[in-house]
Amino acid sequence: MSKALSPSVNRPYGLARACRAWRMPRSTAQLHRRNARSPRPDPVPARRRGPLGAMPDPAFVERIRAVLSASP
C-alpha cells in the first residue's frame, strides 16, 4: 500500500494499517488500486431508445388512425 517502510519491522505498511490511518474503508482503497492498474474502457455513448429509423408516412398515418379508432 505504501512505499514507506515500517521502522519496527522494516517492511512496507499493509493495506489495513494504511486504511486505518487514512480512515478509509479497505474496499475503497482496493477499488482505487484496481482502477489505477487497469482503467475502465471508455463508456459506450448513450443511444436513443426506440426504433432506429423514421417510420414512413403512410405507416405513421395508419398507426395514428388505429389509435384514434381505439379511443372512446
Image (tube, helix red, strand yellow):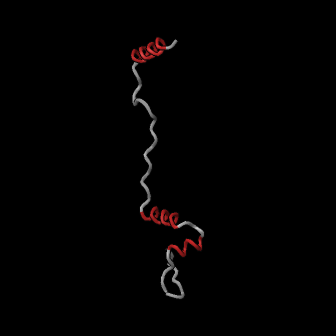
> Which residue is at 48% across, 13% downward?
68
Q: Is residue 22 above or below residue 38?
A: below
Determine the residue located farthest toward the front in the rendered image. Answer: 72
The one of 12 and 16 positioned closer to us in this rendering:
16
**Across the whole image, how many numbered discs are drawn on residues?**
0
Residue 62 image point, x, y percent: 41, 14
Q: Position of residue 45 (x, y in %)?
A: 45, 43
Between residue 51 and residue 9, name the one nearer to us: 9
Write the residue at 52% across / 80% down: 4
Residue with the most extreme bottom position? 8
Q: Position of residue 71 (x, y in %)?
A: 50, 14
> Residue 49: horizontal and vertical position, in percent?
45, 34
Residue drawn 47% across and 13% down? 70
- Establish if 14 lies above or below 39: below
Q: In which quarter of the view is residue 37 placed?
A: bottom left
Position of 23 with respect to 66 (left or right) is right
Image position of 34 with respect to 47: above or below: below
Q: Between 59 and 11, which is closer to the camera in this rendering?
A: 11
| Residue in the picture at 51% in, 79% down | 13
